[in-house]
Image (spheres, rainbow, N blue to C red):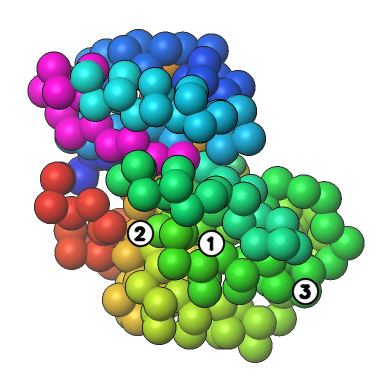
Amino acid sequence: MPKFAHDAHTHTVYSDGIGGIAENIAAAEEKGLRLLGITDHVHYLSERTLSRYVREIKRWGGEAEITVLAGIEGNLTFNGVDVPDFMARKLDYVIASVHEWLESPSQYIELVKLALIDENVTVIGHFGANFPHIGYPTLEELEEVLELAEANGKAFEISSRYRVPDLEFVRECIRRGIKLTFASDAHYPPAVGSVSWSEKVFRKAGGRKEDLLFEEFL
Ligand SMILES: [Zn+2]
Ligand SMILES: [Zn+2]
């Protein structure tokens, strides 16, 4: 079992996952996690279903032995992050991720910078997942991203699904006091808590409990 066992990025049937909220929680408890975040894709949720979603997370979470948080995964577009204010207010935290196809790493960085100045956003999801396909940003661009994250108190997830960001980036986050989370990005209950890559990179980078966004629950 990894140290500081938590998983801050999982999906359910409320978006494109195949498990229910209770099933994700049960899987997290079985794996010995201390904290689980349910973070379905925002574009599957309407105002009505969001209320039901949050209610259900709180109800099952209230009965669980672990902390369960109600989050959401928004999409980063050139118009900003598509999580409306009324949704953000009802949620414990918001992940913003790039999901669209981009031509260059510079475009990717431009999008991420929009999230870093968006007050609804808590965590940047799978940062750099498409760099192997579109190319890597320059050191200056990465520096800009880190500076903005530091200035605005944004966190990055360490994604075990995409194996990003790399060790150097995580080290730099820790050096600057930028908080981190572990993320499986599970779309079915057996994958909940599959965060050993996250934990390994965090440990290699010299991460301590206080470097984790949700340290108070761990
Ligand atoms: Zn994603
Ligand atoms: Zn996801």
Three-letter residue code for mark 3: Ser
Callout 3: 10 Å neighbours few (<14), some, many (20+)?
Answer: some
**Residue at x 30% of width, y 76% of height:** 177
Can residue 165 be seen?
A: yes
| Foreground: disc 2 or disc 1 | 2
The span shown in magenta is 60-72
* Circle 3 SS class: helix
Horizontal and vertical percent for residue 12? 48, 20
Looking at the rendered structure, the kind of residue marked 1 is Asp
Residue 130 higher or lower than 161, as above or below: below
Pointer 2: what residue? 180
Of residues 75 and 210, the one drawn nearer to the viewer in this rendering: 75
Q: Which residue is mark 3?
A: 106
Specify whether residue 66 is painted magenta. Answer: yes
| Residue 179 falls in image quadrant | bottom left
The residue that appears at 33% across and 36% down in the rendered structure is 70
Using the numbered discs, state the Cα–Cα distance from disc 2 to disc 1 in whole angstroms: 13 Å
Taking the magenta stretch, the answer to whether it contains residue 204 is no
Determine which residue is flagged by label 1: 166
Q: Is residue 207 left or right of residue 74?
A: left
Q: Which quarter of the figure is the N terminus placed in?
A: top left
Q: Earlier in the sequence, mark 2 or mark 1?
A: 1
Q: Is residue 155 above or below residue 106?
A: above
